[in-house]
């Protein structure tokens, strides 16, 4: 029998469990319990960090798909949205973070030589550091599934060559990976649902 991994977000105990019997004892009889089964531990790890909102629809019931975002019907305005822009691959790259509610720029960096995925990755980590300094558990939205995956892996899985031109961005990547390895955070990193909500609030508008 193929093993499953059970994530409990709300219950008598939270975390990842490897049997339904164990999971059941922590959610049975708990009002509003939030839990879901996943086929791999990697998926379970991402789900635990993403939060139960990513896997339940607007009615509070489990959604059919496994996604790393909130319900398509709404997003949390009390959040930071991040985005990157790059001309070429690699090329001049910059990123920024804005208030999802007001669109006000919170931070902006670049341009330096890099790629769009690297910019998205650095933007999320910059946002996490910004929020940790302010002891805020505000969520972060990104429209890059790749960047979200890299952050969860704590490593930028990029093939960008290390050259004189990319020296600065590689220094930033190393700093970001070091920060992720040495820090913990409770902030949810969620996928921005462009097809439902329009362009992410931090979009550079260069498409």
Image: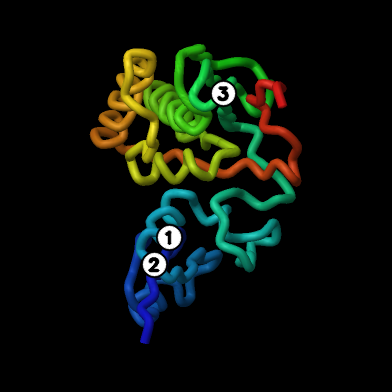
Marking on residue 15: none
Count residues near mark 3 (Cα–Cα under 10 Å), then give few for <14, some for 14-19, many for 20+.
Answer: few
Q: Nearer the viewer, residue 129 or 135?
A: 129
The residue singled out by tag 2 in the image is: 40
Per the image, label 3 sits on a secondary structure element best described as loop
The colour style of the image is: rainbow
Please name the residue shown 28% across and 26% down the image.
174
Q: Is residue 161 above or below residue 4?
A: above
Task: First in sequence, mark 3 or 2: give its number.
Answer: 2
| Mark 2 → mark 1, Cα distance in angstroms | 5 Å
Q: Nearer the viewer, residue 22 or 87?
A: 87
What x and y, as percent, mark residue 178? 26, 30
Please name the residue shown 70% across and 50% down the image.
72
Count residues near mark 1 (Cα–Cα under 10 Å), then give few for <14, some for 14-19, many for 20+.
Answer: some
| Mark 1 → mark 3, Cα distance in angstroms | 32 Å
The residue singled out by tag 1 in the image is: 43
The residue singled out by tag 3 in the image is: 88
The quarter of the rendered structure image containing the N terminus is bottom left
């Amino acid at each position: 029998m193929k093993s499953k991994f059970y994530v409990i977000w709300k219950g008598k105990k939270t975390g990842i469990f490897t049997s339904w019997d164990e999971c059941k004892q922590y959610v049975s009889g708990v009002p509003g319990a939030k839990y879901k089964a996943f086929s791999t531990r990697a998926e379970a790890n991402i789900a635990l960090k993403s939060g139960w909102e990513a896997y339940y629809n607007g009615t509070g019931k489990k959604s059919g798909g496994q996604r790393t975002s909130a319900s398509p019907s709404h997003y949390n305005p009390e959040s930071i949205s991040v985005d990157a822009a790059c001309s070429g691959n690699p090329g001049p790259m910059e990123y920024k973070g804005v208030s999802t509610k007001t669109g006000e720029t919170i931070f902006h960096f670049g341009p330096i030589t890099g790629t769009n995925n690297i910019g998205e990755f650095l933007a999320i980590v910059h946002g996490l550091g910004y929020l940790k300094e302010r002891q805020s558990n505000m969520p972060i939205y990104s429209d890059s599934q790749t960047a979200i995956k890299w952050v969860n892996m704590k490593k930028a899985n990029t093939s960008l060559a290390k050259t004189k031109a990319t020296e600065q961005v590689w220094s930033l990547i190393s700093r970001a990976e070091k920060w992720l390895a040495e820090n913990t955070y409770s902030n949810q990193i969620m996928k921005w649902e462009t097809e439902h909500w329009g362009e992410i609030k931090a979009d550079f508008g260069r498409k």
